[in-house]
Amino acid sequence: MTSALRGIDPSRYVVHVGFLLIFALFAVVLKDDGFLTSTNLLNIAQQTAPVTVMAVGMVFVFTAGEIDLSIGSVVAISALIAATVMREYAWPLAVVAGLGTGIGIGLLNGALVAYARLPSFLVTLATMGLLAGVARWLTNLQSVPITQNLFNNLFGAGRLAGIPSLVFWTVAVVGIGHFIHRETRFGAHVHATGDNARAARAIGIRIEQVRLAVLVISATTAALAGLLYAGRLHGARYTLGETDLLTVIAAVIVGGTHLNGGIGTVTGALIGSLLMGMLNNGLILMGLSVSEQMMVRGLIILAAVALTLREPNR
């Protein structure tokens, strides 16, 4: 037992312990404010669903040693295109259009990074600005309502056995992402590429294809998040997702994925996303001002990152 305990890396479980401690703190402090009610807990899960979906895609990108700054803009443009198509055609075609938009953007980002060998930071930064402008131009800063009840129920506003559909989407995406990331050859190639691209190439891994694939995955999950936002809000607007980038990155890093590649965890990203949502919810219930909420969140994120990603030999 002693040898087994010595082999455990405590830094891998910081976010889990932190989540439980903060949950217990809010449960005690806010016991009379409805924090522990099923309605509030399901509300947290609903609010964090799009962020969690995007975080799954970002785990693949970070693990491969890349970054995607365009996800917020992909959310908006994909939702707007889906809502626009839905005005004239059946909602399944609109879903295909929205997801196809994300896939196309991911292919563009991936091709420029993998084959033109441009830095993913600069490529996705440029894409972010370009898509933000297109989203504003496409609808002239107007929202696009969605009146298809089946779409709205399936992608955001519906419930099954009392559980919001957004929770089912979260479970499905996290489950599939975790399996691919941990149990498949592609997942192993992603880890190897992020850990040492030159060595990965030497053993026959096509790192260009890996880099292309992870950016397609990231953009596709962002497009799906856009559909989830549109379904929950019964419409799309150019502002969708514009504040999510930093939240997604924080959730992924706090969850234990390394910025420099080679190490990533989908389940950790889920915990990190729920932690961010729980913090927002709990701090609001405590009556803190916006500035106080920002300071507390920043301190907690800094502490979690320092404990999770610190280098012991420095």
Image (cartoon, rainbow, N blue to C red):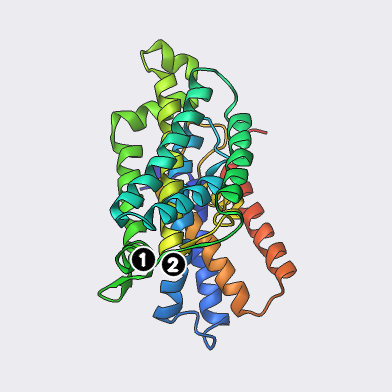
- Horizontal and vertical percent position of residue 236: 49, 59
The residue at the point 49 percent across, 21 percent down is 114
The answer to whether 306 is drawn above or below residue 205 in the figure is: below
The answer to whether 143 is drawn above or below residue 178 in the figure is: below
- Horizontal and vertical percent position of residue 277: 52, 64
- Examine the rendering and report whether any part of residue 255 can be seen: no
Q: Residue furthest top?
A: 202
The answer to whether 177 is drawn above or below residue 20 in the figure is: above
Q: Residue furthest right?
A: 291
Which sits in the foreground, 74 or 278? 74
The answer to whether 138 is drawn above or below residue 214 in the figure is: below
Asked if labels 1 and 2 touch by Cβ distance under 8 angstroms, the answer is: yes
Tell me the crowding category of disc 2: few under 14, some 14 to 19, or many 20 or more residues within 10 angstroms, Cα based. Answer: many
Q: Quadrant of the rendered structure where residue 159 is?
A: bottom left
Left/right placement of residue 172 relative to residue 103 reads left
Q: Quadrant of the rendered structure where residue 29 is?
A: bottom right
- Horizontal and vertical percent position of residue 64: 47, 30
The residue at the point 60 percent across, 46 percent down is 132
Residue type at tag 1? Asn
Element class at badge 2: loop
Tell me the crowding category of disc 1: few under 14, some 14 to 19, or many 20 or more residues within 10 angstroms, Cα based. Answer: many
The label on residue 152 is: 1
Residue type at tag 2? His
- Examine the rendering and report whether any part of residue 241 can be seen: yes
Which sits in the foreground, 8 or 60? 60
Whichever of callouts 2 and 1 sits on the residue coming sooner in the sequence is 1
In the rendered image, which residue does mark 2 sit on? 234
